[in-house]
Image (tube, rainbow, N blue to C red):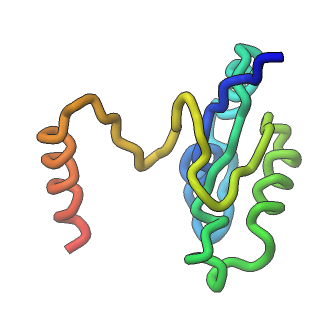
Amino acid sequence: MKQKPPLVIDFDGVICEHRFPHIGEPTEGVQEALDTLRKAGYRIVIHSCRTSQRFKSLLIGDQFNRIREYMKYHKLPCDDVWVPDKPVGVAYIDDNGMNFNNNWDEITEQLLLKSKKYK
């Protein structure tokens, strides 16, 4: 049996509103989108920095289980919550992602503009 292609989706800012370290409400349209993508044959894999060792001292409780329970509570399709390394996927959906298409000049320009707000 052929395995469904994994679609890797960020949690904070994509599945739910970005309220880190708290968890926000589901983003508008997320349930419908996930239902449609799952019916199209994708495996829904959630990936989050919440499960990172870096945030272990900042966050209360097991973040892996918090994400799983959140997805279940809000009836959001989820086949897996991936920890700790980057999962293999046919696509990655992330609110901080940048699309690479041999466009280093464009990416560098965007990041330099963004860096000004961090200074």
Q: Residue furthest bottom?
A: 57
Percent from the top left, x then y, of residue 72? 87, 46
Percent from the top left, x then y, of residue 52? 61, 69
3 relative to 47 in the view: left or right: right
Percent from the top left, x then y, of residue 68? 82, 53
Q: Quarter holding the N terminus? A: top right
**Residue 89 to residue 32: above or below:** below
**Identity of the residue drawn at 22% across and 31% down:** 102
Q: Quarter holding the C terminus? A: bottom left
Give the quarter of the image for residue 59. bottom right
Nearest the eye: 80 or 18: 80
**Residue 71 to residue 30: above or below:** below
Percent from the top left, x then y, of residue 99? 34, 35
81 relative to 110 in the view: left or right: right
**Identity of the residue drawn at 60% across and 57% down:** 85
Nearest the eye: 46 or 24: 46
**Identity of the residue drawn at 62% across and 42% down:** 27
Give the quarter of the image for residue 98. top left
